Image: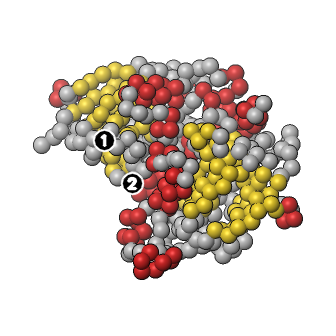
């Protein structure tokens, strides 16, 4: 990614909610500034929020159980919202979801705004619901999340475990918008992160213009299913 | 984990067969137990759970898997909502493993999975939409969350892959769900004709309910 093509850049502090419409033809790079960040993300068609990231379709269409380079984020309508054109971690979790008020209070106690001002303890579920509400959406629009920069390992029996030190400082993931995509995310700590302290890890957001998708694009050719997913997506914009 | 039930069919308060391609909706009241039986084997019971008293509360796969620390649904699984409340518990299971990562089939995803010409074949998402619209309590497409596929076997590989494998289910195998709260259960009996996991032959399910126990 050519830094000189950056159109917009901002830092989202740890534990905060963020949203932005990433237009088709743009790529957003998420960078784990300090290492150990987590980005719990939701994705919607910016023109029709009822079309949204579908965890099951994303996994079964591509025969995967995590996101990594050249995989795609599918909507529930057989189309591709975003493609993972580049990333440095090799595994981004789709299973663990987000923290909630009870989980954070149970592990770290309460820290209110009155007492701590903007250092108060926030949680992923409530923060994402607040961000969704800015678009008129609510709990019924909260689906499963993709947790970028986090690996939840699955053993042969299906047991889950958090992998420590998975994302060093400077790790990044590039998401190319194949549709105009409302990207909503929270930078709170992953709910399975065993940290004894409440973590605040910042994430840099950079939006670039990208080149047109070629016929031999590695995301498009990742599997025959993705070729058809790209065709469905192109047909949507005729 | 395999566990047989001690409940007798003769004690049930409700029993109904659901043909392939049809939906089934019912509010299972707190304290009641629902058994879903794979009558002829290797069928998929695609199932969504909604709180009928607060329809914005519904099944969430991430919460369910994280809290149990395992990627498969079986005996002991607490079926959790977006609010992370326990809606139902799996109290018996003679199949051993059920999927919640694959979600339901749809006309649209079929085009990517199997071919652009596979659009016009009956699908679970269309069945779900008919079921939740017919329930007439304001549910719509947004409520069609990633569901549980009872009797489906989707092994997750430690390397990050997954696949729909041949079933571990068989004729007469069942799963039993105890309601920890009133739960609207919406089932689509999967009509998929493109996947070898059901031998291209969708078959009936039986839904059986037992009343609250002492």
Q: Residue at x 41, y 75 (%)?
A: A112
Residue B155 in picture, x, y percent from top left? 54, 44
Query: In the drawing, does residue A90 fall left or right of residue A184?
Result: right
Q: How is the image coloured?
A: secondary structure
Q: Secondary structure at mark 2?
A: loop
Residues A54 and A61: in front is A54
Residue B44 in picture, x, y percent from top left? 46, 30
Question: Could you tell me how many numbered marks the image carries?
Answer: 2
Q: Quick check: B178 above or below B130?
A: below
Q: Residue furthest bottom?
A: A115
Q: Residue at x 69, y 41 (%)?
A: A80
Which residue lies under the disc numbered 1?
B53
Residue A40 in picture, x, y percent from top left? 57, 59
Q: Quick check: A127 above or below B132?
A: below
Look at the image and tell me in which quarter the N terminus of chain A lies.
bottom right
* Residue B191 visible in this rendered orientation of the protein: yes
Q: Chain of mark 2?
A: B
* Camera-side mark, 1 or 2: 1
């Amino acid at each position: 990614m050519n830094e000189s093509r950056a159109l917009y850049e901002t830092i989202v502090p740890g534990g905060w909610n963020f949203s932005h419409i990433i237009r088709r033809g743009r790529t957003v790079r998420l960078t784990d500034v300090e290492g150990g960040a987590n980005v719990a993300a939701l994705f919607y068609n910016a023109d029709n929020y009822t079309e949204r990231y579908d965890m099951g379709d994303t996994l079964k269409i591509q025969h995967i159980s995590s996101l990594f380079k050249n995989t795609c984020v599918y909507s529930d309508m057989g189309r591709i919202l975003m493609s993972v054109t580049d990333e440095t971690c090799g595994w981004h979790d789709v299973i663990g979801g987000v923290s909630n008020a009870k989980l954070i209070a149970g592990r770290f106690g309460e820290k209110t705004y009155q007492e701590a001002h903007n250092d108060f303890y926030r949680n992923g579920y409530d923060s994402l619901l607040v961000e969704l509400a800015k678009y008129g959406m609510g709990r019924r629009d909260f689906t499963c999340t993709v947790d970028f920069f986090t690996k939840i390992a699955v053993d042969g029996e299906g047991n889950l475990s958090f992998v420590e030190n998975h994302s060093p400082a400077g790790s990044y993931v590039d998401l190319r918008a194949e549709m105009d995509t409302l990207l909503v995310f929270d930078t709170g700590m992953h709910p399975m992160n065993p940290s004894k302290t409440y973590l605040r890890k910042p994430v840099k957001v950079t939006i670039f213009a990208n080149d047109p998708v070629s016929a031999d694009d590695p995301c498009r050719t990742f599997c025959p299913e993705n070729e058809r997913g790209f065709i469905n997506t192109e047909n949507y914009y005729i | 984990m395999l566990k047989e039930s001690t409940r007798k069919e003769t004690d049930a308060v409700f029993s109904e067969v659901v043909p392939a391609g049809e939906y089934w909706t019912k509010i299972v009241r707190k304290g009641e137990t629902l058994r879903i039986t794979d009558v002829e084997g290797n069928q998929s019971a695609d199932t969504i759970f909604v709180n009928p008293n607060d329809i914005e509360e519904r099944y969430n796969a991430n919460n369910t898997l994280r809290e149990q620390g395992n990627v498969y649904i079986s005996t002991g699984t607490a079926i959790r909502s977006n609010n992370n409340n326990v809606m139902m518990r799996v109290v018996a299971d003679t199949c051993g493993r059920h999927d919640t990562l694959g979600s339901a089939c749809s006309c649209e995803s079929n085009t990517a999975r199997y071919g652009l010409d596979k659009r016009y074949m009956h699908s679970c998402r269309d069945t779900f939409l008919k079921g939740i619209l017919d329930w007439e309590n304001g549910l719509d497409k947004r409520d069609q969350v990633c569901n549980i596929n009872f009797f489906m076997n989707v092994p997750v590989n430690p390397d990050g892959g997954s696949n729909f494998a041949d079933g571990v289910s068989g004729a007469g195998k069942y799963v039993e769900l105890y309601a920890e709260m009133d739960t609207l259960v919406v089932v689509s009996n999967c009509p998929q004709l493109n996947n070898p996991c059901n031998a291209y032959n969708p078959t009936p399910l039986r839904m059986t309910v037992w009343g609250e126990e002492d």
